Image: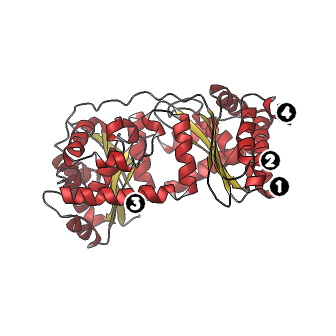
Amino acid sequence: MSVNVTKLASGLTVITDTMPHLETAALGVWTGVGGRDEKPDEHGMSHLLEHMAFKGTTTRSSRDIVEQIEAVGGDLNAATSTETTAYYARVLKADVPLALDVLSDILTNPSFETDELEREKNVIAQEIGAAQDTPDDVVFENLSELCYPDQPLGRSLLGTPQTLAGIDRHGLRNYLTTHYHGPEMVVAAAGAVDHKQVVAEAEKRFSRFDTTPSPKPVPAMFGKGGSRVIHRDLEQAHMTLALEGLPQKDLSLFSLQVFTNILGGGMSSRLFQEVREKRGLCYSIYAFHAPYSDTGFFGLYTGTDPSDAPEMMEVIVDQINNAVETLTEAEIARAKAQMKAGLLMALESCSARAEQMARHVLIYGRPLTVEELVAKIDAVTVETTSNAARGLLSRSRPAVVALGNGRGLDRAVSLAEGLSRPKARALLH
C-alpha cells in the first residue's frame, strides 16, 4: 500500500492510499464536527445539515446530484456521528474527479431551499418516530442521557421535533460557516486513485475553506451513574449498562478493548458462553467500547424475558467482576488475534481504508501505520488488561437502563450496583 499525505494551505489534509489491483475508488470528506458540537438550540443540526447536503446546490438540483453519480455506476452517501460528519462516494477510477466535484459542490454551494428544508425536517421527524418504536434505540438513548446528563453527548443525534422546527436555512448556513474549516477537514481516498490528481482537485474545489480553527466542544463529564426503568408492554426486557471508558489517545485503550472483547466481543466471549450457551437466558448479548476525544463509553446490551432479568443482571455482574481477576493468556491471545484480523481484513476494503485514514488524521494528526497498530495490540498483556479492567470499574458508578414490563426490571437494575459495591447483591437476598 502507498499512503501519501498533503496538507493544503487552508489546513485541509488530503490523504490517499493507492491500491493498484482495484478498478474502483472510495473517497470522501470527513469533518471534525458532530452532535457534541451543537448548542441546545442547535440540537439535531449536524444530522440535518448532512441530510440537506444532497438536497440541491446553486449549480445542481437534488436529482442532478444523485443522477450524475449513479449515471456512472457510483453511489453517494453521508453519515453523522458524535464527533464527525462524513460525505463519501464510491466510483470507478475514471470518475474520481466527478465524485470530488459533487462532494465539493454540496459543501461549498448548498442552496438550503426552504421547501426542501421543510420536507427534510419532516423526513427526520419520521426517523425520530421510527427510533421511538425501536426498543434498542430507546434504551440506548436513555442510557446516553443517564451517562452524560444535560450535555450534547447525552442527546440523540437526530434532534427532536421541537428543535428541528426551530432550525431555518440561516441557522444551517451559520452552522456550516462556524464549524467547517480547513484544519478540521480531511479529503481521503483509497483504491484506484492518483495522489497528485486528488490533491489538484482538492486544491481547486475546496479553496473556500479557510485556516480558521473551529470552536472546540465543551469537555464531557460522565455522570454519577444510577438507573432508569422504562415501562413498556414488550415481549422482552431490553437492558443496557454503561461505565466511563477511555479517550482515544489513552495509553490503556487497546488493553481495555481486549478486555471488552473477552467479556462480550463474540461467540467465544465470557458473557455469550455463560449467559446464552450455558443458561439460555438470551438470544443476543454483547459489550463494546466507544472512545471519544476526551472520554469513553463502555456499554453492554442484552435482551431477555422480564422474569429472567434479575438472574441475567446477576450473572452479568458476576462475570464482569470475575473477569477482572481471572483473565488467562489464552483469552488475551484470542482477543488480540480477533483485533488484528479485523484490522487487516478492513484494509482489503477501499471504503474502510479511506474512513480509517480520515479518522486517524482527525484524531492523531497523521495516519497510523499497520505496523504501529499491530504493535499496540501485541503490547497488550494479562497485566495491562487486568489493570485496564480495574480502572474501568473504579472510574464511575454503573449507569443502567431497562426497558420492558414486569417487576423483575427494578430488581435487575438494582443488582448492577454490585459492580461498584460487591456486597450490594448479597444484601438484596
Q: Quadrant of the C terminus?
A: top right
Which amino acid type is shown beneath numbered disc 2? Answer: Glu
* Residue type highlighted by circle 4: Ala
Q: Which disc number belongs to residue 126?
A: 3
- Residue 174 image position (x, y, % from top left): 21, 40
For disc 4, the marked residue is: 426
Residue at 71% x, 42% y is 410
Label 4 vs 2, first from the N-terminus = 2
Q: Kindly state the secondary structure of the residue where label 1 is placed.
A: loop
* Residue type, mark 1 in image: Arg
As measured in the structure, the alpha-carbon distance from the residue carrying label 3 to the one carrying label 4 is 46 Å
Query: Which quadrant of the figure has residue 57?
Result: bottom left
Query: What's the CA distance linking mark 2 and mark 3?
Result: 37 Å
Q: Earlier in the sequence, mark 2 or mark 3?
A: 3
For the residue carrying disc 4, how many other residues have a C-alpha within 10 Å: few (<14), some (14-19), or many (20+)? few
Is the residue under label 1 in contact with that under label 4 (CB below 8 Å)? no
Assess disc 2: are there few (<14), some (14-19) or many (≥20) residues with their C-alpha within 10 Å of its C-alpha.
some
Residue 264 in view:
yes
Q: Secondary structure at mark 3?
A: helix
The residue pinned by badge 1 equals 279
Q: In what element is the residue under mark 4? A: helix
Q: Is 44 situated left or right of 171 in this image?
A: right
Q: Mark 1: give few (<14), some (14-19) or many (20+) Cα within 10 Å.
A: few
Mark 3 or mark 1, which is nearer the start of the sequence? 3
Across and down, in percent, residue 74 comes to 32, 68
Q: Earlier in the sequence, mark 3 or mark 4?
A: 3
Mark 4 or 1 closer to N-term?
1
Q: Which residue is mark 2?
A: 311
